[in-house]
Image: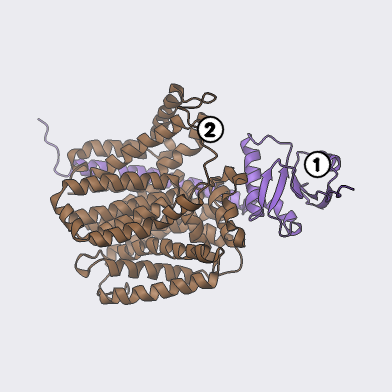
Amino acid sequence: MIKLPVWLTRQNIILAVISLSFAWGIIGTIRDLSALETKRRVKPYSFGGNIFAGVKGATGEEKYIGYLTDRDINNDKVAMRFTQAQFTLAPIILDFNNPAHRLLILDFNDLKLARAAAEKMKLRPLKVSPQGIILAERPAERPAP
Amino acid sequence: MNYIFPWLISILQGFFLLTALIPAAVRPRMLLLVFWGALTGIATTALLTFTSFLFFNTLVPLYAIGLNIAVTTGLFFLAKRNTLILPFTKGTVDKAEIIGIHVLLIFVIPVVLHALIFPDGGWDAWSCWNLKARFLFLGGENWRGMMDSALWRSNISYPFLLPLENVWFWCFGAEPTTTVTLAASCRITLLMSGLLFFGLKELNGKLLSLLAPLWLLSIMFVVKLSSSQYSDLLVGTWLLSALLGFKLFTERRAPAYLIITIISLGFMSFTKSEGLVLAVITGGIMKLAILFSSEQRKAALNAWKGLLAAAVLSFLPTVIFQLFMAPDSHTFINGLTSADKPASIERLTATLYFLGIEFISPKWNGFWLILFGGIILAGSKAFKRGLWVIPAIIGIYIISVIGVYTVNTFFEILWWLSTTLNRILFALLPTLTFWLFNALRD
């Protein structure tokens, strides 16, 4: 029977494998951090929701705002955009595709489509952000004569 | 600069609390007490801040700060009665620990660099945790808006320990700054690493314990998740804290450690739904372990009043939330009763397949294979000295997770698995590493 050296214990075998995994991880980390540094030079900070910050000043004390879009919320990118908008505008609650609120955000694929939708619903635009997001107000309904 | 104060108050509050709880004769080494105290103190200061919402229905920063300073001062006197020794007292920290803490700080740098690019964290962080924090901080009396059904995509039925921790830090400024959310990922990573290192070193006395957190922090995927999905790491850190407390209780027979274990479980249950499930499973398994050991049973019975008080106080936020606040989950369909979306064997197969794929995925740097191999090599040592509770807890938890994936048919299974399963496994890494390194003990 082969006699194993005294230092070749089960414990040392596992620790050696963990050390190898650790060393391999360090190489990966160095590689990743250098790629990250390149990324940071191009874009030092990343948060998509900032494009909604532009309309924030005009929302007042509103509790709910309807968020209207022609995009498909089942698409992850659209869902992400909506939740980032929600994060940026909190504590206002964005009600997805619910046009019943006094204030509405129109975030369409195309600004022309958003303007057309606002016109169709007879909304009064309060603010249009450089990124093409419209904050509009639903005119108060006239009391019945 | 303002944020140094909440840090200081939290660390001191936790440190004094643990010092007041643990008798000097069985107290752990100083740096474990500091790290454990910081983790506990950040949670207790956050939960005391929560009382502002309960009493005034809004955040009153001055009340939160005043209350926390008063409680910390009270705990200082209690700790003083229980032979308080401060961290900077000569001889309380050894050279190996000083080396360890510096190395850990270096290894947290990649998390900091990732967090700098994404200061609001990943999707889960800004769609749920940091969103809730903003509601709590900015919402005034409308803070409960964070649980409005219109926000069903943001896990409105989840509790909110992590958001409250951020709110506690924001109390020291006027704005909900990204400095705090950015620091949250680094803070939780550092506390997890420190607890793992100093906890293992407390048990085996070896500097080699440092390899455990370093191994985790060398996995790039872990670094990325730590900076983006830090709520899962918080669950993982509390689970580690509970198991470390239980291990020290079984070895030293000091009920104070069982009290800390219960506190950890209570706080974990207020982190997220997975934390509540883990707290129930862990509590149940530990209770069994105590019942089967006459010595542990005797030690626990001697301190039943303290244990009961710890359980009531630490689970109180969860009980209040679940009974009076939590809205119904909008993302649950019971596939066992639903005719439209029934549970199927395909969902179960897909879950098991994804689980298998995760275990061999290169993104984990072989962690799972090494873990399984290590446990096989360690043999019975991995289950002795009370260690069997860890695989029992993790095993039951994984079975529960598989059950939820199979039965809840709200989400399309492949999408759901691909976006969440890795995070569930990620939360278990600190505890599993703790298990493996304990199994390697002489």
Tell me what hue chain B is rendered in. brown
Amino acid under label 2?
Phe
* Residue B147 can be seen in this image: yes
Question: Looking at the picture, does residue B106 appear above or below residue B274?
Answer: below
Q: How is the image coloured?
A: by chain
B18 vs B141, nearest the viewer? B141
Cα distance in 3D space between marks 2 and 1: 31 Å
Q: Is label 2 or label 1 in front?
A: 2
Q: Is residue B98 left or right of residue B351?
A: left
Asked if residue B245 is positioned above or below residue B88 in the image, the reply reads: above
| Residue under numbered circle 1 | A114
Amino acid identity at mark 1: Ala
Name the residue at 49% across, 48% down: B158
Chain A's colour is purple
Q: Chain of mark 2?
A: B
Q: Which residue is mark 2?
A: B411
Q: Position of residue A15 (x, y in %)?
A: 27, 45
What residue lies at 78% left-to-right and 51% top-to-bottom?
A: A129
